[in-house]
Image (cartoon, helix red, strand yellow):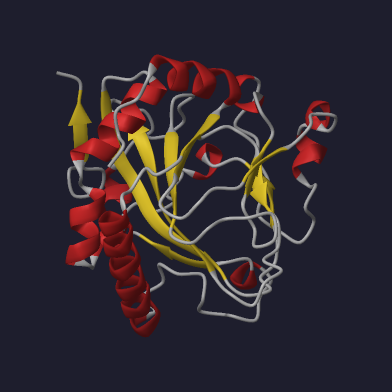
Amino acid sequence: MKYKITQAQKDFYRQNGYIAIEDFLDDKELETWRQVTDDAVRQRLIERNGMTNQNDPDQYYAQVFVQCVRLADTHEGMAKLMLDERLGEAAGELAGVDGIRIWHDQALIKQPYGNPTAWHLDNPYWSFHSRDAISIWVALDRATLANGCLWYLPGTHLTARYDNVGIGQNMADLFRVYPEWRQIEAAPVPVAAGSAVFHNGLIAHGAGANMTPRPRRAMTCAYMPDGCTFNGQRNVLREDYFNALQIGDVLDDPRQVPLIWKRG
């Protein structure tokens, strides 16, 4: 795993809000990630326990991608992948923070001829606010302009507020909230399988439709800097934990947000 971060990568990430790292996984690691993700998603879709968007597969959002959240909670192999300290180190070094907790993992599989992913921000959905939140997006298949690679509006993490829109049918709804971003040139990020893309939780991003007869698989994980506090939104919090929290409480339950890396 190519997890050691260079100063040049830090500089690019902090200016632009994203960074692609080619060959992040070697061939053996990539095959393991593919097998584990396929198995965990298959298990989740059989269980249909609510942590997937496929309970009503005819809805528009269900056809943007197959989304399965917190797979590490129910799949031992996925837990082993997600709890890898090296992932936390890479995220923490890019974000410039002293500790990294997992917010949630999720598989995102854009099915053949799947819908585009509208422009949106990530962090405003979550139960904490942080300008240093960061996610990793690992390409399990080659991500191209044809099959729905990620696109970013560079630098928008620097001026974003915590206002957001849902991922709906109108690609440009986010510009109703941030009209000042409409003239920014979007940057596509096609990458080879095994590559990783890290992005800030407040950068505007989206993806095109999958215009191929093959799926475009990705395994992702959202990270919370250690020390973040509850903002009142439930998102993926367990019901008992959510009910016990007050706004401003530090989110540090190791079952909900495990600490996977701390600066030595």
Query: In the visual, does 118 lie left or right of 175?
Result: left
Which quadrant of the view contains residue 152? Answer: top right
Q: Residue farthest to the left?
A: 264
Q: Quadrant of the C terminus?
A: top left
In percent of width and height, residue 256 lies at 25, 48
Question: Residue at position x 59%, y 24% from top?
Answer: 16
Q: Residue at x 23, y 53 (%)?
A: 81
- Residue placed most toward the observer, 67 or 48: 67
Can you say whether 112 is above or below 110 in the image?
below
In the rendered image, the vertical position of residue 241 relative to residue 22, given as above or below: below
Question: From this viewpoint, which residue is outermost toward the bottom?
Answer: 46
Foreground residue among 190 and 237: 190
Left or right of 184, for residue 247:
left
Picture coordinates of residue 64, whole percent (x, y):
63, 66
Question: Residue 72 lies in what quarter of the image?
Answer: bottom left
Against 133, is 191 above or below? Answer: below
Q: Does the image show residue 108?
A: yes
Q: Which of the 4 image quarters holds residue 257?
A: top left
